Amino acid sequence: MFYKINAKISYETIEEETVIINFDSGKYYSLDKAGILVWDSLAQGASAQNIVEDLSKRYEESPANLEAVVVGFIAELEKEGLISSCDATDIRNVDSAHPKIETSMTGQKIPFEAPVVHKYSDMQDLLLLDPIDDVDERGWPNRKPDA
């Protein structure tokens, strides 16, 4: 199965953290370590199975456990409205050579830590103040008439 990043999602990786903002809910999220790798792979069009295969080359973990963790992690991202399932035809970057998760420089596998979705709502009110979507055709500061 393939996934796509939903429309009102913005994200950026800075150093060793990916920050994701959901402008529909006003919540933001933080991913690190393996979570960054899974997110980047999903954003580039990799399937869940591709991700498991690539992670098994990088981490000291059984493929069965990696699959359970990746499927659960993807389900959480989907539940939060960050991604949605789609067909391969809906993914622009999909080709026979899916994006690869890089292995370590030494070729040695490293210990695996299950990815965690850290969710925050402390800035929800500010993030939901989106004047761009609340304006009429003349633009800001002309608000749409109340429906």
Image (cartoon, rainbow, N blue to C red):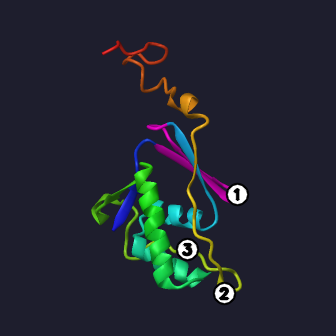
Count the marks: 3
Name the element at disc 3: loop
**Amino acid bearing label 2:** Gly
Residue 50 image point, x, y percent: 43, 76
Q: Is residue 109 magenta?
A: no
Name the element at disc 1: loop
Q: Is residue 27 above or below residue 12?
A: above
In the picture of the structure, the residue carrying the numbered disc 2 is 107
Residue 33 image point, x, y percent: 64, 66
In the picture of the structure, the residue carrying the numbered disc 1 is 15
**Amino acid bearing label 1:** Glu
Closer to the chain start, of discs 3 and 1, is 1
Name the element at disc 2: loop
**Alpha carbon distance from label 1 to label 2:** 22 Å
In the picture of the structure, the residue carrying the numbered disc 3 is 101
Q: Main secondary structure of the magenta part?
A: strand
Residue 75, labelled with which disc? none
Residue at 56% across / 44% down in the picture? 28
Closer to the chain start, of discs 1 and 2, is 1
Q: Quadrant of residue 98?
A: bottom left
Q: What residue span does the magenta drawing correspond to?
A: 9-25
